[in-house]
Amino acid sequence: MLWPALRSVLFQLDPERVHHLAHWALRRVPTALARARRPAPIPALAVRCMGLDFDGPMGLAAGFDKGDVALPGLFALGFSHVEIGTITPRPQPGNDRPRLFRLPEHRALLNRMGFNNEGMEACARRLAALPPGARLGPVGINVGKNKATPNEDAASDYLACIEWLHPYADYLVVNISSPNTPGLRQLQERDALDRLLRACVRHLAERAPGKPLLVKLAPDLSPEALDEAVDVAIAAGAAGIVATNTTLSRAGVERHPRAPEAGGLSGAPLERLATEVVRRCYARAAGRVPIVGVGGVMDAEGAYAKIRAGATLVQAYTGLIYGGPGFVGRVNAGLARLLERDGFSTLSDAVGADHRQGGGKAAG
Ligand SMILES: Cc1cc2nc3c(=O)[nH]c(=O)nc-3n(C[C@H](O)[C@H](O)[C@H](O)COP(=O)(O)O)c2cc1C
């Protein structure tokens, strides 16, 4: 009950300032406190995939921790895994402010941050300096290209990030789906994607055989383009698909005064679109790689919908902003109840359940 009151105060302030304040506080959480405060894992929710063990499905999506590294604090919130990034080779300031907006009536955010980050070397230094035990679960690192790098040279940016950051990552994500770096999404097209992913997979395999490399896709691809991207990604050796990034669509928020702002929409209005993308990726991947479901997960029902549609892991960002520090604990408790209600003894049994029950929900 404390959170709604605190949230109404915080929501009076500039969103990016609140973000920095929250991150500052989270960076100060010592590992011992994080261990003590972390909600106890629920055994039925444990997930093993890509050779990694997760004590639940819920991870923090990329973009909250852009390399400042607040790992113990973020794990203390109950996340099973944390995805850091997007990190680019060179530091860059991102777009001009304001670049992050709340749409509280819709439980949504709109952002055009533009990969503001201090670059791969600073991120690597911080990760290297973490005290032992600060990683309370798998840590993913999401990598991108600098704004100034033309798409023809994009691969060298991704490879540089992989080179610097792979020692600190349990998995890596190639982000080609942010709407806020001009031209980035063109890297999702077949030939560009094939070249980029093959280069990244090879580079990582030579340095850290077996370490998973995933690709993060946009929710705005046509169904055919999505199928093609999944096929190309798997053929190139990607270990999983992260679906999805923010959307350029304004469906459901058309009349909001912030709707005309440039950027990607996240939160509740993205939920159904992202779930349908997960559904289609799962059908297309046909068990060859896991799907990480992201987009508008605001509660346990939303996480469960992603899982039933085919997500092995689930991530959230906007749900944390609206749900507060108790968000992950509530989602996990609710997920355990939903699994029991539907007669699943483990979470893995529920992954893709919609596809096995007919009823026209499975993607064609
Ligand atoms: C402020 C903000 C910054 C983000 N930055 C990144 C980023 O740097 N890299 C990335 O892959 N996704 C980024 N995302 C997208 C999220 O990881 C996620 O895919 C998207 O917000 C949908 O999930 P949600 O509805 O739970 O927020 C960002 C999202 C927000 C709201």
Image (cartoon, rainbow, N blue to C red):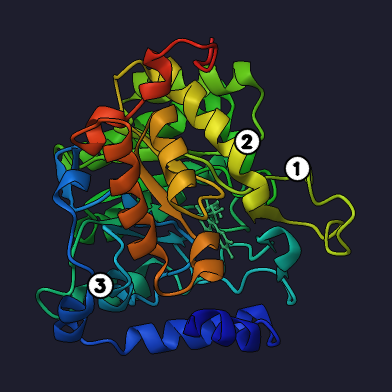
Residue pictured at 31% horizontal, 47% vertical: 337
Identify the element where label 3 is drawn. Answer: helix
Q: Nearer the viewer, mark 1 or mark 3?
A: 1
Q: Horizontal placement of 252 versus 120: left or right?
A: right
Q: Nearer the viewer, mark 2 or mark 1?
A: 2
Q: Position of residue 313 (x, y in %)?
A: 33, 42
Label 2 CB, ligand 1: below 8 Å?
no
Within 10 Å of disc 2 (Cα), the crowding (few <14, some 14-19, many 20+) is some
**Closer-to-camera residue (196/363):** 363
The amino acid pointed to by label 1 is Ser
**Closer-to-camera residue (333/212):** 333
Q: Is residue 179 above or below residue 223?
A: below
User: Do we see residue 320 in this rendering?
Assistant: yes
Q: Residue furthest left?
A: 132
User: Do we see residue 129 in this rendering?
Assistant: no
Q: Position of residue 95 (x, y in %)?
A: 69, 69
**Closer-to-camera residue (14/123):** 14
Q: Nearer the viewer, mark 3 or mark 2?
A: 2
User: Mark 2 highlights which residue?
Assistant: 273
Residue pictured at 50% horizontal, 71% vertical: 117
Label 3 CB, ligand 1: below 8 Å?
no
Q: Answer with mark 2 or mark 1, whichever residue precedes in sequence.
A: 1
Callout 2–callout 1 Cβ contact below 8 Å: yes
Q: Position of residue 281 (x, y in %)?
A: 46, 24
Q: Find the distance from the CA under tag 1 to the CA under tag 3.
A: 35 Å
The amino acid pointed to by label 3 is Leu
User: Mark 1 highlights which residue?
Assistant: 249
- What numbered label is drawn on residue 127? 3
Q: Position of residue 62 (x, y in %)?
A: 45, 58
